[in-house]
Amino acid sequence: MSPLNKEQLNQIRDERKEQIMRAALKVFAQWGIVGTKISMIAAEAGVSQGLFYHYFKSKDEAFIALVKEAMEISYTSTKSLQSIPISPLEKIRFLTEAILEEESKYYYLLIYQARSSEGVPDEVKELFTQYSMKAYVDLLMPLFAEGQQAGEIVAGDLEELISSYLTILSGVMVMNARESSDYRIPEVDMVMRLVTK
Amino acid sequence: MSPLNKEQLNQIRDERKEQIMRAALKVFAQWGIVGTKISMIAAEAGVSQGLFYHYFKSKDEAFIALVKEAMEISYTSTKSLQSIPISPLEKIRFLTEAILEEESKYYYLLIYQARSSEGVPDEVKELFTQYSMKAYVDLLMPLFAEGQQAGEIVAGDLEELISSYLTILSGVMVMNARESSDYRIPEVDMVMRLVTK
Amino acid sequence: MSPLNKEQLNQIRDERKEQIMRAALKVFAQWGIVGTKISMIAAEAGVSQGLFYHYFKSKDEAFIALVKEAMEISYTSTKSLQSIPISPLEKIRFLTEAILEEESKYYYLLIYQARSSEGVPDEVKELFTQYSMKAYVDLLMPLFAEGQQAGEIVAGDLEELISSYLTILSGVMVMNARESSDYRIPEVDMVMRLVTK
Amino acid sequence: MSPLNKEQLNQIRDERKEQIMRAALKVFAQWGIVGTKISMIAAEAGVSQGLFYHYFKSKDEAFIALVKEAMEISYTSTKSLQSIPISPLEKIRFLTEAILEEESKYYYLLIYQARSSEGVPDEVKELFTQYSMKAYVDLLMPLFAEGQQAGEIVAGDLEELISSYLTILSGVMVMNARESSDYRIPEVDMVMRLVTK
DNA sequence: GATGAATGAGTATTCATTCAT
DNA sequence: AATGAATGAATACTCATTCAT
């Protein structure tokens, strides 16, 4: 009797959830978890407040899901970088470009919000153990080491270099992420001077 | 008539207001205006919530006062840099060091919060007209131009260079400002590579 | 989409708003705007405090809406009196009865509260320009003049007579409006002696 | 050693207390007990908030003292009326004039506030047992009865007549008591028509 | 699945009262 | 006696979450 079969229902479910998550990402990224009201997410997604609770148990749950997604994507894409057959320096430039890309700004801002706000659910804090700065440094260490050996990357302590480099890039993305930001995303060439001779 | 004379009262008032402002700066910087509860400021300052309202009309008023202070200080100190009798490059290094200094982190975070949060009083938004990125760029322009002519600063569009440089420094301070931050403040030498040949 | 259609929702909204307004009228009239706590209105209406804010932006807004209503009703009903085909004196008696009627007491008390309390929103004060004592006097002037010519109304300055008469009636209603009032509503015959020969 | 002797101190005490009571009367009368803030009384009296508490234990105490004073004065003056050697009707006219006198308005308003507001201390409510409407009616009963017998006062139930008359006069004073009132105090002659043939 | 009315716990702010000086 | 800083309880208002439809 039902006019929609199970598959179709599932598809609606998935689409709606996705739609709400995109809205939530945007709002969380800009306002932080404390500053975000469910009404904002609902308005951004164009649905009712009630529907939000059909798909998420709570504000926290949605936030956690988004942070998890953001971390996984950024970690995986950094990781997958390794296998591309280009020189270390080119890989680093590639990564830099990827990070500075306009689309990723909400993700970086969200991760920043998650990492630094204190009104954040414990479950999110646990994610940081897994996706810590150190994890990223470890991921990039071979790349930078190789570049150093090739004489393309500046000499010096690599952990310090890499974590500073990541901090700077994250900082730029955060500064730039709000609408009508006065701040400016630097050119890739400029950023590359940080790590090259 | 009064059991305490005017001077004594003024001193108490000034000290207390200062004490509350320091607490408010710390809390606002870390939690943003929406995330900050008056109870947090009161607890941080070690006074009652009521006393907060003895000295500030509202949360917004305190926020505005702090942002104004922060902007004035950062602008004035940048300006005063000019008159020190050292080379342009040394001035820029000096400025870089000053910005990256641990103590100023709350101010930078606060300015960032003010500039980018959207739940911010209109009066704060007006401050941005006065202390815009462009104002800072204009302030630093002669310095960088001189450095460029001396062959110490990289060639290229100066507005772009300066605003990128400021964005990066601001970003670093913001990333670093939270307690227990995973992020790392880069060495001054590293940052200087951004602008030097 | 909606599980309740627009009409049903509108009906619920209207009923609920009406229910809250009736409660608010009663409480405001007795306690004044400063003495009225939202919790009193909510309790009187049998709803939660939150729901009050679903229907009214603030205590002031509800107060304003009620005063507006009260003034419009009293003005319109006074005006509509004119067209009834009875003698001037009978009209005045009719009006007197209408004012002294038990049901209207909350409205009179509310208008008094609004007119005389000082902690009243500006918007309410503006209403007084429109519904001033003079406006009522002007409305009743022809009636009393006719009665005077017919020799049924005492001689003398009509503006003075009418405004005194209205003041007295308002005063009586105000004195009587509280629960368990010791004061007594005079008989219509007694009041009529004020204006008749 | 003290520059002021005991008597002088007592005098200062009394004057200050009086000064604060006059201010309190004015403010309580206009704003009611809930609407009155200690800061208002202090400002009106031109003293500090702290000093208020030197002379009164609490807001309630001051309110009670004022209401007691107002009731005693109005009761006593009504009573003392009896002994003046004039005709009953003249006495009533005299009383009417006394009540409608501008100076007494704050007292009437205060009594009204006390009688009708519900946020009033229990001690005040007890005063009403003593100074009830009935007490006043009893006080005036002989006067009106005599006038009735002399054919100067309208016939009919005296309790009803007197309490209505008092209600009307109180009402007028209350309506008129606020600053910038639109209401009008009727002429004595007009009011007298209420009770005379 | 979808809506928006309804709730109540939490937060900003006010104000009676106390207290050190 | 006099002041005004300081406190904390009370109150207006907001917002995450639930629920009837």
Image (cartoon, coloured by chain):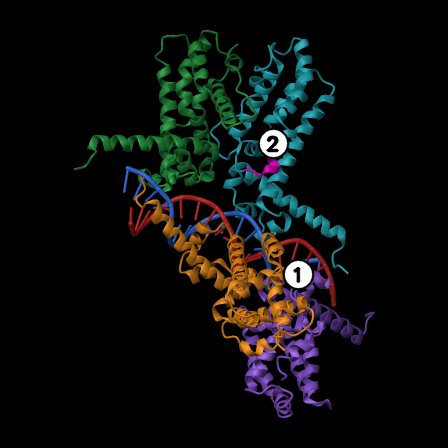
Chain colours: A green, B cyan, C orange, D purple, E blue, F red
Q: Which mark is residue B2?
A: none
Disc 1: CA contacts within 10 A as few (<14), some (14-19) or many (>=20): some
Q: Quadrant of residue C190?
A: bottom right
Asked if disc 1 and disc 2 are in contact, CB closer than 8 Å, the reply is no
In the figure, D161 relative to B173: above or below? below
Question: What kind of residue is marked 1?
Answer: Met
Instruction: From the top left corner, tell me how far across and down residue C169 is, in percent.
Output: 58, 70
Q: Looking at the picture, does residue D181 appear above or below residue A101?
A: below
**Which residue in the structure is indicated by mark 1?**
D40
Q: Residue furthest left?
A: A1
**Which of these two is toward me, C46 or B181?**
C46
Residue B121 painted magenta: yes
What is the number of the mark on residue B104?
A: 2
> Distance of mark 1 from mark 2, alpha carbons?
44 Å
Query: Residue C122: where, in percent of width, then height?
Result: 61, 52
Residue stretch in magenta: B120-125
> Which secondary structure is most common in the magenta stretch?
helix
The chain identifier of the residue carrying mark 2 reads B
Which amino acid does the dot numbered 2 rest on?
Ser
Q: Nearer the viewer, residue D30 or D65?
A: D30
Farthest residue in the front direction?
C150
Q: Residue at x 52, y 52 (%)?
A: C61
In the image: residue B31, left or right of residue C9: right
